[in-house]
Image: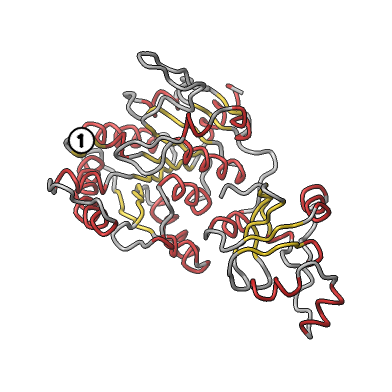
């Protein structure tokens, strides 16, 4: 496994690096020494022939420090206002740091809608590819100033996981305030060791994830649980994840030189297509279809499509073409694009195809969800 990690890092051509607020900021705002060090390390990666896309948090924290007012930013509009103040300051420091190294950087602010639309996704992809081909470093953040709940990625871990598909990344590096994925709950006055390798993201099933990974830092919005969710998504795309202690000096240099820092999450052996990855994660599920035992076996064991006869219950309100969860009892099997809206689904659930045609007058789709539009074990 150590050899696999070394080979993957050595041969990676395109790298997505995500850095969190807890690494970039302190009590007095942005930590300029960290930004300069990060830029220097990325410059060395670029000099080795790699293309680097940087996903950077820190705008809200930078704005909060710059606009020191009691209770500023406690509401959503307040946080969005702080992001408007802080984003320019964040980019100014990145521009100074990269310019001193002879590297151009570019600001890219995204909302989920930018990746939800297939045409806008492809247009964004072309923009990123041009920037990377020119040797520029795209610096990406969520457009917090205008994003509303339905358009928010949730946190930059999830945004970075979607960028892996967009820029066709080979490795995903997540710089966090923790030493990696911890093996136990830290005790007072003691340090818990990090798990060096997760051969599969499912290796975490034996851990108390809520206790180990549920906590968030005061500066950030994610937490280790969010990072593992992003790692699971990356694994499905065939991209390994390296969760590194971002506060360790020269951590990127040391990791790419072969030092075994942090936690390495291996990619899945059964990867999904980039189209199916985009389909599953471009929006949150709008409802749920609960299937019977036979349908669950057909989906998981035989790679089949979901037919109306296998659906027992419909939850939520959604239109045809919406992403929905596929549930077997309390267990989520995956997500997929429903060919029918919730109103029609409630009418045809449990029916054979001939009865569906008789009820609706025409059978546009024999499948509720075609297997090509279904992602099993989705990380949502």
Can you give x and y, in whole percent of width and height, for residue 212 in the image? 48, 29
Local secondary structure at mark 1: helix
Q: Which sits in the foreground, 11 or 122?
A: 122
Q: Is residue 43 left or right of residue 196?
A: left
- Seen as rendered, the residue at the extreme top is 189
Q: Quadrant of residue 244?
A: top left
Residue 258 in sight here: no
Can you give x and y, in whole percent of width and height, for residue 55 in the image? 38, 46
Q: Is residue 142 left or right of residue 80?
A: right
Can you give x and y, in whole percent of width and height, for residue 361 in the image? 79, 86
Q: Is residue 125 left or right of residue 361?
A: left
Q: Callout 1: 10 Å neighbours few (<14), some, many (20+)? A: some
Q: How is the image coloured?
A: secondary structure
Q: How many marks?
A: 1
Q: Quarter holding the N terminus?
A: top right
Q: Please tell me whether residue 230 is drawn above or below residue 185 in the rendered image.
A: below
- Seen as rendered, the residue at the extreme bottom is 361
Residue 295 in sight here: yes
Residue at 58%, 69% in the rendered image = 317
For label 1, the residue is: 32
Can you give x and y, in whole percent of width and height, for residue 196 in the image? 53, 22
Q: Is residue 84 left or right of residue 118?
A: left
Q: Quadrant of residue 34?
A: top left
Q: Quadrant of residue 146?
A: bottom left
Residue at 62%, 49% in the rendered image = 378
């Amino acid at each position: 496994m150590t050899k696999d990690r070394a080979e993957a890092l050595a041969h990676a051509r395109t790298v997505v690096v995500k850095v969190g607020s807890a690494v970039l900021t302190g009590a007095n705002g942005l930590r300029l020494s960290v930004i300069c060090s990060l830029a220097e390390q990325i410059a060395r990666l670029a000099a080795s022939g790699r293309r680097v896309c940087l996903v950077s948090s820190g705008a809200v924290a930078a704005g909060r420090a710059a606009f020191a007012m009691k209770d500023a930013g406690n509401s959503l509009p307040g946080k969005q206002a702080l992001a408007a103040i802080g984003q320019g300051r964040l980019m100014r420091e990145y521009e100074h740091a990269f310019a001193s190294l002879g590297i151009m950087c570019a600001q890219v602010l995204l909302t989920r809608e930018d990746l939800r639309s297939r045409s806008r996704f492809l247009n964004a992809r072309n923009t990123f590819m041009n920037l990377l081909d020119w040797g520029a470093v795209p610096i990406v953040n969520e457009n917090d100033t205008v994003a509303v709940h339905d358009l928010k990625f949730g946190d930059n871990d999830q945004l970075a996981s979607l960028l892996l598909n967009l820029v066709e990344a080979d490795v995903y590096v997540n710089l966090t305030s923790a030493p990696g994925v911890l093996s136990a709950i830290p005790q007072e006055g003691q340090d818990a060791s990090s798990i060096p390798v997760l051969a599969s993201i499912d290796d975490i099933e034996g851990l108390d994830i809520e206790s180990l990974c549920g906590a968030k830092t005061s500066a950030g919005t994610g937490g280790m649980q969010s990072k593992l969710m992003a790692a699971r998504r990356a694994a499905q795309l065939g991209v390994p994840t390296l969760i590194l202690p971002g506060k360790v000096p020269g951590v990127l240099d040391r990791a790419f030189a072969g030092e075994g820092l942090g936690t390495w999450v291996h990619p899945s052996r059964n990867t999904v297509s980039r189209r199916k990855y985009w389909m599953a994660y471009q929006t949150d599920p709008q409802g749920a279809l609960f299937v019977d035992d036979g349908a669950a076996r057909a989906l998981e064991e035989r790679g089949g499509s979901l037919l109306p006869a296998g659906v027992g219950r419909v939850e939520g309100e959604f239109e045809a073409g919406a992403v929905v969860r596929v549930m077997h009892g309390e267990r989520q099997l995956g997500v997929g694009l429903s060919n029918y809206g919730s109103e029609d689904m409630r009418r045809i659930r449990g029916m054979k195809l001939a009865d569906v045609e008789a009820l609706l007058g025409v059978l546009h789709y024999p499948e509720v969800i075609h297997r090509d539009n279904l992602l099993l074990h989705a990380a949502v």
